[in-house]
Amino acid sequence: MKRFYIFILLIFSITAAPVIAKEKVFEPQKHIEYINLEWWKRFEDENLTQNLLKLYENNYDIKNLALKVKENEQLVKMQFANELPTLSLSGDLSRDLRGPMQQYGNMRIPNYSQYNYLLPLTAAYEVDIWGSNRLKTKSVKEQLEIVRQAERATYIALTSDFAADYFNLIKADKFLEVQTELIEAQADIVDKTEDMYEIGLCSINELLSEQKMLTALKEEKNNHLKNQETLLNSLRVYLADANDNIRRNNYEKIVLIKGIPAQYNAEIVSYRPDYMQEESNIKRIGFDVKVAKREFLPKFVIYGQIGLNAYHLDSLFNAASQFFNAGVLPSMDLFSGGRKLALLRYRKFEYEEALNSYQKTILEAIKEINTGLIEYKTAAENYEEALNRLRMQEKIYSLMLDKHKIGASSDLDVLYAKEAFLMVKKEEISDKINTIIAAIGLYKSVGGIDLYKLNDNL
C-alpha cells in the first residue's frame, strides 16, 4: 500500500513540474554557412563582407526563418509523441441521485444518493502494426526539410539581392561624380557659347541647344540622386538599421572577378534549394499516400488503468478502494461515407501534382542557369568592348589637350572632347557593374555555390 501511495505522489509531481518550471528563453539557431563568405571574399571588398555579416545578425527575415525551422522541429516532436505510449491522470467526483423503485430483475432498490470518488491513472498505446504513425513522422520530417531548404533559399536570395544593390549603389556614387563633371563642362560650354553669341559668332539656336543640354544633364543628376537614396533605403532595410550610413568601397577599388567557368555539369541543378524542396515534397506526399492506404486497416490500442475508487472520501486510500484493469481495444471503421477512399484519391492526385512540379522545377532551374551564363558572358564581353572604347576616347581627349597646348584647338573643342570621354566613362562604369551583378545572378541561380568550385564538387 505504501508503494502505491508513493507511485501516486510521483505522478502528481511529474505532471505538476512543467507548470512550475521556469520558461527558458532561447535564441533560434541561424546558419552562417548559408552566407558563403568564402565566395563574397573573392570581391576583395571588406565593406561588403562586413555588411553581409551585419545582415546575418540583424535581418528580420533571417530571424523569422530560424523561428519557422524551430516551429517545424516541434511539429516533428509532436508527431513522434504519437508513436509513444500515453499516461494520464484524471480524477472524477460525482454524486448519484437515483429515483425510487429502481428494479434489477426481482430486486427493487429505493431512491438513494451517494458520492463517487474516482482517481484513475490511465495508460494507452496504439500498436503501430501497419507503421502508420511512423510514416506520419517521416512525412513531418520531410516537411521540416522543405522549411530548411526554404531558409537556405532565402539566405541566398537576401545576400545576392543585397550585394546587387550594394554594387548598384557604388555605381550610383560614381555616376554622380561623373555627372557633376559633365555639368561643370557643359556649364563652361554654355558660358563660352553665350560669349560667342554676344559677338555674333554663333546663332541663337546653337546657344539654346547647349542650354537645353545643360538642363538635361542636371535632370539626369537628379535621377541619380533619387536612385542613390532609394538604394540606401533598401540596404538599410536589409540591415534592419534605418540610420545606417552603409559603408562602401569606391568604384576604383572594385575587383572584377574573372575566370568563371563558362559551362557546368547538369548535376548543378541538385544544389538548388527549390530542387531539394520538390524532392522532399514528393517523399512527404508519398508517405501520406501510404498512410491513407493504411487507414482502411484496423487499429489496436493496448490500455490499462490503475487507481482508486470509493464512495466515501475517508475510505479513498484504503486497500479495498484500489482497482486495476487492462485490455486490448481493436477498432475498424465499417462505413465512413467514402471519406477514406476520397482521402486516398486526394493524396494520389497530390502526388501526381508534386511529380509535375518536380519536373517543371528542373526545367526552370536549367533555364535560369543557362540564362545566367548567357547574361554573364554577354555582360563580360560588353565590358571589354566598353573598356576598349573608353581607351580610344581617352586617347582622343588626350590628343585634343595636346592640340590645345599648341593652339591647334579651342577651349570648346577640349570641352566637347572631355564630355565625350565622360559619356563613354559612364558606359564603362555601367558595364563593369552589370558584369559583377550578372556574376551574382549566376551564383544565385546555381544555388549559392562558389562558381569557381562548383565543378570540383560534382
Image (tube, helix red, strand yellow):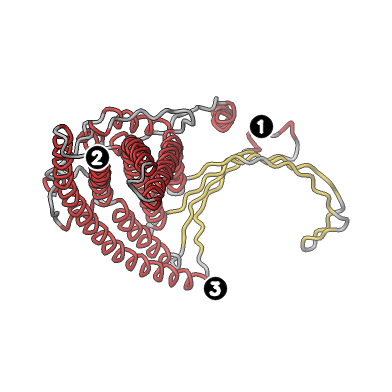
* Sequence-first disc among 2 and 1: 1
The residue labelled by disc 1 is 317
The residue labelled by disc 3 is 335
Above/below status of 430 relative to 378: above
Who's the residue at 56% across and 41% down the image?
A: 88
Who's the residue at 14% across and 35% down the image?
A: 402
From the top left corner, tell me how far across and down residue 34 is, in percent.
30, 39
Above/below status of 288 relative to 306: below
Above/below status of 313 relative to 445: above
Occupied quadrant, residue 419: top left
- Whether residue 70 is visible, yes or no, is no
Q: How many marks?
A: 3
Q: Which residue is farthest front?
A: 199
Please tell me the numbered disc located at residue 418. Answer: 2
Residue type, mark 2 in image: Lys
Classify residue 101 as left or right of residue 357.
Answer: right
* Sequence-first disc among 2 and 3: 3
Occupied quadrant, residue 130: bottom left
Q: Residues within 10 Å of mark 1 (few under 14, many from 20)?
A: some
Q: CA distance from mark 2 to mark 3?
A: 89 Å
